[in-house]
Amino acid sequence: MSRLIYLDNAATTQVEPEVLDAMIPYFTEYYGNPSAIYTFAGKAKGAIEEARKILAEGIGARPEEIFFTGGGSESDNWAIKATAEAYAAKGHHIITSKIEHHAVLHTAEYLEKNGCEVTYLDVDENGLVSPEAVKAAIRPDTILISIMMANNEIGTIEPVREIGAVAKENGILFHTDAVQAFGHLPINVEEMHIDMLSASAHKLNGPKGVGFLYIRRGLKLRSFLHGGAQERQRRAGTHNVAGIVGMGKAAEIAFREMEKRSAYVTELRNHLIERVLAEVPYTRLNGDRWNRLPGNASFCFRFIEGESLLILLDQNGICASSGSACTSGALDPSHVLLAIGLPHEIAHGSLRISLSGKTTKEEIDFTVDRIKEIVERLRNMSPLYEDFVKKNA
Amino acid sequence: MYSEKVMDHFNNPRNVGEIEQPSGVGTVGNAKCGDIMRIYLDIDENGVIQDAKFKTFGCGAAVATSSMATELVKGKTVQEALQVTNKAVMEALDGLPPVKVHCSLLAEEAIHAALWDYAEKNHIQIEGLEKPVADIEEKEGAEETTEGY
Ligand SMILES: Cc1ncc(COP(=O)(O)O)c(C=O)c1O
C-alpha cells in the first residue's frame, strides 16, 4: 500500500514543517540549559518565555499562569491530585463525568483509594454533561469540578462556560481537560470561568510529550514533580526547550488559522457524516450532529466488530480508530460509548474518523467507499446480521 | 500483532457461510464481549464431517480461529473433531497474542456446540463431549435496538 490516508488526528497529528523548523535550532544551536546563567543559555530561556506568551494569549490568560508539562496526562494528574492535596482541609469530594479521558478518570479512581469521594456524572445520549446536574452534585465538601472541554471519542463539546459559572457561584475550583479543544476551538479562561486547563501539543500539529497546565493566579497548587526550581518551583525538570518552542509555534499557527481551518474541516466532516449515514444502513452517528469538534466523526455500524473493520481499513492504507474492546485488549468497549447508552454489541462496532486541515475530499470519498465494502463484507460474515435478516424476512 | 497465518485466514476466511439443514449448528460467545461464533456441520451417516461453515462477529483473531477450526474439522470423524482443541487451532495459526487466546477457546467451544446439537438431533451420545457452556440463547429484542442505527 503506497498511499497513506491518515484519519486518526484525535490520537495524534503530524508535526507541521514550520513547527519542526522552529524547533531544530534548539537541538543544534541553542542547546544550552535555560536555567543556566551564561548568555548562551539566554536564547533558550527567551524562546520558552516567547512560547509561554503565545499560549497564554491564546486562552486569555497571563504568561505566568502557564506551566509547561510533559503532556496532557501529566497536566490532568497534576491539576486533580494537587487540588485534592491543597484543599484537603475543605473537603474530599470531586465532581467529574463518566466520559472523561482516562488521564482524569484513573486519577480520580486513584484518589478514591486515598480517601476522596468522586461523583461521576452521567451524560445524555449525545454525551453532554448538564450544568444543572453539576450543580445538583455539589456538596459542602466539594473541592473540584473537572469536566472536559470536548470529548476525544465522540467529539461532543461540553457546556464549559455554564459549568464554569456554576463552579464560580459555588466557590469551587473548575478544571477542564482541553486537550482535544485547545487550538481547535476558541477558549477564554476568563469568560469560561476556568481555574485550571490541560493542553497537549501533539493534538495540534506540535510535538509529542509536551503540554501545559494553566493555573489561575493565586491558586495554591503545589509542585507535582519535585526537584529543580524550574517553572517557578512548580514543575521540576530541565525544560523540553525544543518541544515547548514547537508547542508555541503550533499554537500560533492554530490560532491564526482556526477560523479557516475549522470551516474547511467542518464542511468535510459533514460530507463524511452525510455520506456514511445515507449509504451504510444500520449505522448511527455518536455524539451531537452539530455540537462537535470540527474534525470528529464517530459511528457505530451494527452487526460488526470494530477491530476487524480497522484491520481491513488499514489494508487500504486508512488509519482510524475504534472504541471496541478488542482494540484495547480490555473486555468492555469504550466507557464513553457505554455512557451515552449504547448496548455493548453496538459499541463494539464503533469507528472514529478524525480529520485534519490537510485531509482532502478525495480521501474522504475513497474512505467512505472502502467503509461501504468492508462493512458489507463483515456483515455477510456476521451471525448477528444473519439472525437479523432472518427475523425480518 | 498477528501472525501471517492469522492475517491470511482473516483476509481470506475459509468456509464462511451457512449450511442449509445442517447436521449440527452451534453458536457460542456473546455480543456483549464482542465475539460470537456460529459453526455449521454437515455430518454423513458414517459420522464423518463432510462440510463445515461458519459465521463470526468479532475481531481479526475471532474470524481467523473460526476459519481455521472449520478447516481442521473437515473430513474428520466426530471423535477426531473432538481432538481439535483450542491449542490445535492456535498452533495451526502460528500462535495468537495473549489477549486473543480466548478466541481459540471460543472456536473449540463452537465446534463442541455444533457436535452437541448433532448428538441431540440424532439421540446419540458422543463420548467425551460435554454440554458446551457458552451457548447463547436466541437473542431477544434485536428489533428494538434497530431504530436510528
Ligand atoms: C481528552 C484527552 N485528555 C488527555 C489526553 C492525554 O494527552 P497526552 O497524550 O499528551 O498525555 C488525551 C490524548 O490522548 C486526550 O484526548
Image (spheres, coloured by chain):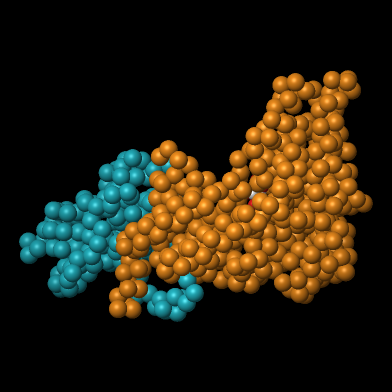
Report the label total.
0
Q: Is B121 drawn above or below residue A154 in the view shown?
A: below
Q: Is B53 drawn above or below residue B121 in the view shown?
A: above
Q: Who's the residue at 52% across and 59% down the image? A: A272
Left or right position of B108 against A37 = left
Instruction: Give the color of chain B as drawn.
Output: cyan
Q: Who's the residue at 43% across and 38% down the image? A: A2
The quadrant in which the N terminus of chain A is found is: top left
Q: Locate residue A336, reporting x and y percent.
A: 59, 62
Front in this rendered view, residue A336 or B130: A336
The single residue placed furthest to the left in the displayed view is B46
The single residue placed furthest to the right in the displayed view is A218
Front in this rendered view, residue A248 or B1: A248
Q: Locate residue A269, reporting x and y percent.
A: 57, 58
The quadrant in which the C terminus of chain A is found is: bottom left
Q: Locate residue A124, reporting x and y percent.
A: 63, 72
* Residue A356 in view of the camera: yes
Quadrant housing residue A174? bottom right
Instruction: Give the color of chain A as drawn.
Output: orange
Left or right position of A290 against A232 = left
Q: Who's the residue at 42% across and 69% down the image? A: A281
Q: Locate residue A164, reporting x and y percent.
A: 81, 64
Q: Is B21 drawn above or below residue A112 in the view shown?
A: below
* Residue B85 in view of the camera: no
Front in this rendered view, residue A189 or A323: A189
Front in this rendered view, residue B1 or B85: B1
Q: Who's the residue at 84% across and 30% down the image? A: A45
